[in-house]
Image: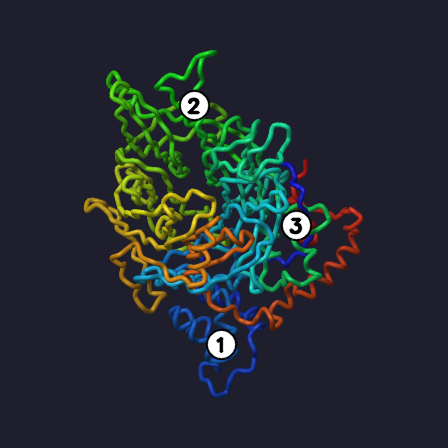
């Protein structure tokens, strides 16, 4: 049963927009649906000296704007204030969202083009995507903007949600640990949205947009809608006595070999309902207004909680990795562990002793757990006499649409008499257990591919997030493209450098319109040496960041020496049947730059940022390839975040200051209505007797109650 985490929320709700129809309507009809609402927000007095300004709104919306390209639309804001207001309407930009071929970030399930408080994001979505694709193909991409803000905490680990609007961080303050959610794109600047107290340092931090709920029905037989959430997963190391102990923070870092004397390992999943989060994060709310501080999710007092504890998984051994994914429309988490193989009582570890790779799957709705013990390839166990072997899973990646999991494994062999050693590396596909299974199963790979016989110190697999829906039922151009390739980045030891391999999809034989990943489509892309430097990768399926630090510096804040972009060359075999996607489209006037020859190249960053991280070192870093955003924390200022953007977002129009949201909840309205609600409901007294509908909402609000114990 779900348990509430002690963080509360007060929020005056924003009026809810009606759900968009699932049936695709003609373009003119869609515009006409919004014509009256748009007319109410556009100045009625046109410029008599402008011919286009004297055209009626229905002519502009139905007969002119649908045929213009992105550059034309963005230039129209110079014509007049009336036209400028018009072209910022989200219904204009929804067309471009659906038509552009450049990579668009996976949109949040709550993103609505009919909501005034978030409609401007569609314009930013298109502007960012085109700007980033153009900038990333330059010989040396530019950092177009830098935003620096004080996080108020010491930052330990960062995770950007797709689209870059929200940043999740594992932090520490006064020897206490928290999970924080920041809003990065507010017109007033980045600020904290929510805080979660945790007993020890959270590591292996993961966060995704997901739909939470089962395909259940209410008492009337109607399907209960799923809830859009931010799902957050992390691991803890605490003391068996209840911890945390008075040990230094490094004791609780799963990436360090030091452990508490009596460790208890846990994987914790919590979720946040995205609907109230969107209301708090709305662009027209002033987060710095003193009277509005009480509406922050984590500073309210009426007992409502933004974080709902979804799953706690106690474990006996340390966690190697955590991944969130969707399977059959439901949220899942998988946890990888390297467990010691069982020994007989008093038995010493033999030379060929090996650990066992466990992958634990958990359905976050039903809370059912199952375990897969990944056995090595049968051929590995048939070595000649005198040889021993050990196996280690280095990275995993779930492929829920084909009910398999990709595993990268290293098998080390040694000759007992000569001491000769060698490493063999394999990519393997294992079949997932059935969704309702609660068993522990031992299984070998369904297929295997030999990668190389080299020394790799680190393995990373890209995770290009593909949500099950984009919000209001609209489709993106990329929905008709093949599924993206999976990138595997390997950090070499001798010579020091980076190898990049791609796992391309192929067409299903029995279903020509569907794609699956197959290990016969693994192709080497690049082999890059960084002699004298230690390479680090922020992976991505199409765009990645390579940065280097001194080779022998193993501190927690090594100096940042170089920062390079990596653009996936997307090499394919001549026999490969699926052609690369053409990123150009009719929605843009000019063709994209050609793919650069040098896929690794230095990034042009401001000199002060370069010197800061060279002198002070780098503590934490997060990357979102979808919008080209990097978040960085230096060793000397661990409470400060530098947000580097490689894409132009465009300036927010001044609707947020001109009363455009008068029928929404304005800043003054939030405070005044909030005072009235507090007085009416006696929230400070702890009383809350509001009527609720079947979905847990207040009958007169859009806030969802948290689960109770």
Query: Where residue 586 is drawn, which disc sits there?
Result: none
In the rendered view, tell whether residue 322 sits above or below residue 340. below
Q: Which class describes the residues within 10 Å of circle 2: few (<14), some (14-19), or many (20+)?
A: some
In the rendered view, tell whether residue 84 sits above or below residue 555. below
Give the residue pinned by disc 1: 83
- At x 65% / y 39%, what residue is drawn? 4
Q: Disc 1, disc 2: CB below 8 Å?
A: no
Question: Nearer the N terminus, badge 3 or badge 2?
Answer: 3
Q: Position of residue 66 (x, y in %)?
A: 41, 69
Along the line of sight, which residue is nearer the eye, 539 or 19? 539
Along the line of sight, which residue is nearer the eye, 59 or 344? 344
Q: Position of residue 116 (x, y in %)?
A: 57, 64
Whether residue 130 is visible, yes or no, is no
Q: Which class describes the residues within 10 Å of circle 3: few (<14), some (14-19), or many (20+)?
A: many
Give the SS element for disc 2: strand
Give the residue pinned by disc 3: 298
- At x 41% / y 24%, what residue is drawn? 356
Q: Quadrant of residue 293?
A: bottom right
State how many labels appear. Answer: 3
- At x 56% / y 56%, what residue is drawn? 183
Answer left or right for 685 relative to 204.
Answer: right
In the rendered view, tell whether residue 621 sits above or below residue 432. below
Along the line of sight, which residue is nearer the eye, 341 or 160? 341
Answer left or right for 230 relative to 14.
Answer: left
Question: Nearer the N terminus, badge 1 or badge 3?
Answer: 1
Q: What is the distance, in whole Å, between disc 3 and disc 2 at their CAs?
A: 42 Å
Give the residue pinned by disc 2: 441
Which numbered mark, 3 or 2, is in the foreground of this view? Answer: 3
């Amino acid at each position: 049963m779900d348990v509430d985490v002690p963080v509360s929320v007060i929020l005056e709700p924003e009026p809810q927009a009606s759900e968009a129809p699932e049936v695709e309507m003609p373009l003119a009809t869609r515009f006409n649906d919004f014509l009256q609402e748009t007319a109410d927000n556009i100045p009625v007095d046109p410029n008599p000296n402008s011919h286009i300004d004297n055209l009626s709104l229905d002519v502009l919306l139905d007969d002119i704007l649908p045929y213009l390209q992105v550059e034309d639309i963005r230039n129209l804001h110079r014509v007049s204030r009336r036209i400028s207001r018009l072209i910022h309407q989200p219904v204009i930009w929804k067309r471009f969202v659906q038509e552009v071929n450049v990579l668009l970030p996976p949109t949040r399930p709550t993103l609505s083009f009919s909501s005034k408080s978030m409609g401007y994001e569609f314009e930013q979505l298109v502007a960012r995507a085109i700007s980033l694709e153009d900038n990333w193909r330059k010989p040396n991409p530019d950092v177009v903007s830098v935003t620096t803000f004080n996080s108020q905490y010491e930052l330990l680990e960062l995770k950007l949600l797709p689209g870059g609007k929200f940043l999740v961080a594992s932090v520490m303050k006064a020897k206490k640990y928290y999970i924080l959610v920041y809003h990065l794109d507010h017109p007033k600047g980045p600020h904290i949205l929510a805080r979660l107290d945790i007993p020890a340092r959270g590591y292996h931090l993961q966060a995704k947009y997901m739909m939470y709920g089962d395909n259940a029905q209410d008492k009337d037989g109607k399907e209960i809608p799923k809830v859009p959430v931010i799902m957050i997963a992390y691991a803890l190391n605490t003391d068996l006595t209840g911890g945390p102990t008075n040990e230094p923070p490094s004791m609780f870092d799963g990436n360090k070999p030091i452990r508490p004397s009596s460790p208890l390992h846990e994987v914790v999943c919590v979720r946040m309902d995205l609907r109230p989060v969107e209301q708090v994060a709305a662009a027209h709310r002033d987060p710095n207004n003193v009277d509005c501080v009480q509406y922050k999710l984590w500073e309210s007092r009426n007992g409502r909680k933004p974080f709902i504890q979804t799953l706690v998984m106690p474990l006996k051994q340390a966690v190697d990795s955590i991944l969130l994914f969707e399977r059959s429309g439901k949220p899942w988490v998988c946890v990888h562990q390297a467990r010691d193989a069982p020994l007989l009582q008093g038995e010493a570890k033999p030379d060929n002793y090996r650990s066992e790779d466990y992958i634990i799957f958990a359905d976050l709705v039903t809370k059912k757990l199952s375990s897969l013990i990944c056995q090595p390839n049968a051929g590995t166990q048939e070595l000649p006499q005198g040889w021993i072997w050990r196996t280690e899973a280095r990275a995993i990646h779930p492929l829920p649409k084909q009910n398999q999991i990709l595993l990268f494994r290293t098998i080390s062999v040694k000759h007992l008499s000569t001491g000769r050693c060698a490493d063999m590396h394999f990519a393997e596909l294992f079949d997932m257990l059935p969704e309702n299974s609660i068993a522990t199963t031992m299984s070998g790979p369904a297929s295997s591919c030999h990668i190389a016989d080299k020394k790799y110190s680190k393995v990373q697999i890209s995770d290009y997030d593909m949500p099950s829906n984009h919000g209001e039922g609209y489709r993106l151009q990329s929905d008709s493209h093949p599924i993206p390739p999976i990138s595997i980045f390997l950090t070499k030891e001798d010579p020091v450098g980076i190898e990049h391999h791609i796992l391309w999809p192929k067409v299903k034989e029995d279903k020509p319109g569907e794609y699956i990943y197959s290990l016969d489509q693994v192709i080497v892309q690049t082999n890059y040496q960084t002699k004298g430097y230690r390479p680090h990768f922020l992976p991505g399926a199409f765009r990645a960041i390579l940065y280097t630090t001194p080779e022998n510096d193993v501190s927690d804040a090594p100096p940042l020496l170089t920062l390079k972009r990596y653009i996936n060359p997307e090499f394919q075999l001549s026999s490969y049947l699926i052609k690369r996607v053409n990123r150009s489209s009719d929605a843009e006037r000019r063709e994209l730059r050609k793919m650069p020859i040098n896929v690794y190249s230095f990034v042009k960053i401001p000199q002060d940022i370069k010197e800061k991280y060279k002198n002070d070192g780098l503590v934490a870093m997060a990357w979102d390839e979808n919008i080209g955003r990097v978040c960085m924390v230096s060793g000397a200022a661990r409470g400060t975040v530098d947000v580097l953007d490689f894409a132009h977002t465009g300036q927010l129009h001044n609707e947020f200051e001109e009363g455009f949201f008068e029928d929404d909840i304005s800043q003054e309205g939030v405070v005044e209505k909030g005072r009235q609600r507090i007085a009416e409901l006696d929230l400070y007294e702890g009383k809350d007797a509001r009527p609720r509908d079947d979905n847990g909402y207040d009958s007169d609000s859009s806030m969802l109650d948290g689960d109770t114990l």
